[in-house]
Each structure stands twice: as structure tokens, then as C-alpha cells.
Amino acid sequence: MLGYVTVGTNDLEKAKTYFDALFAEMGGKRTFANDHMQGYGGGAGGMVMVCTPNDGKAATVGNGTMFALAALSREVVDKVYAKAMSLGSKDEGAAGDRGNGFYGAYFRDLDGNKFCAFKMG
């Protein structure tokens, strides 16, 4: 059902470098693009789009907003989290078992958008 989610950035080129490296850990790559937006996909399912705001104002993060990225294994969650930290992300919760078969890691990108890499089961 999900087509794509969009996160804002105030520096598109810096964001592209960050997301190129981060999403590569999950098999993601650049897909759709235009002068103010870059999309990423993994071949199936939805995309993550990073863009400068259309209204020309500063990008800000939503309070309570988070994007969860489904990983193929716990090892991929660990790799994504490690890559995020190496790229300058802010730690919001190291990879670990959160109960009921949910294994997740939480971090914020360079613009403060919150992400979770997770594996169920």
C-alpha cells in the first residue's frame, strides 16, 4: 500500500551522499530524481524520497514522525545502524531486541529525521 515517504533536507547534495551510503546497506539505490528531490528504492515496495521543501522554507522534522525501514535480517539492521552512526547520525537507540520478535535500531539523519531499521521475527 505504501508508495513512498518524503523527508526534508536543507542540503540536498549532502543528503544524497548520506542516503547513497546508508541505503546501499539494504540494497537500496537511487531511483526517481528531479532538481529538488532524490528517490531511493530497493526494487520492491515503497521508496524514500529526500527533498528540499517546495515552499522554499527551511526543512524541519515532525515531532512523533518516524520512518521504519524493513531489513531482511538482524545482521542487516546491525549494518544499517553502524553505517548510520559512521555517517554522522544521531543515536536514538542501538540495535537490539525490543520484545515480541521485534529487533530494531533507531537513528536520526543529518537533518534530524528519525528512522528505524527493523526485522520482525
Image (tube, grey):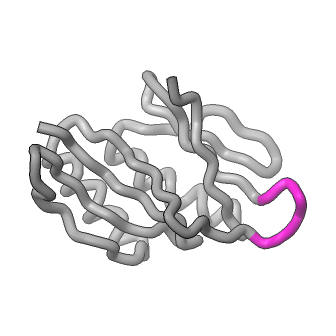
Depth check, front residue: 112 or 101 = 101
Is 54 one of the magenta-colored residues?
yes
Depth check, front residue: 28 or 54 = 54
Q: Residue furthest right?
A: 55
In the picture, measured across the screen, residue 54 lies left or right of residue 22, that is right
Quadrant holding the C terminus: top left
Depth check, front residue: 118 or 79 = 118
Quadrant in which residue 26 is drawn: top left
Q: Tell me the residue at 62%/40% (across/down).
A: 39
On the image, the x and y values in percent for residue 73 come to 16, 40
Q: Main secondary structure of the magenta part?
A: loop
On the image, the x and y values in percent for residue 57 come to 85, 69
On the image, the x and y values in percent for residue 38 come to 66, 45
Q: Tell me the residue at 35%/56% (across/down).
A: 116
In the picture, measured across the screen, residue 113 lies left or right of residue 21, that is right
Using the image, determine if residue 98 lies above or below residue 23. Answer: below
Is 46 one of the magenta-colored residues?
no
Q: Tell me the residue at 49%/38% (across/down).
A: 29
On the image, the x and y values in percent for residue 67 come to 46, 51
Number of numbered markers: 0
Q: Tell me the residue at 31%/51% (across/down).
A: 117
Using the image, determine if residue 105 lies above or below residue 2. Answer: below
* Magenta stretch, residue numbers: 53-58
Quadrant in which residue 106 is drawn: bottom left
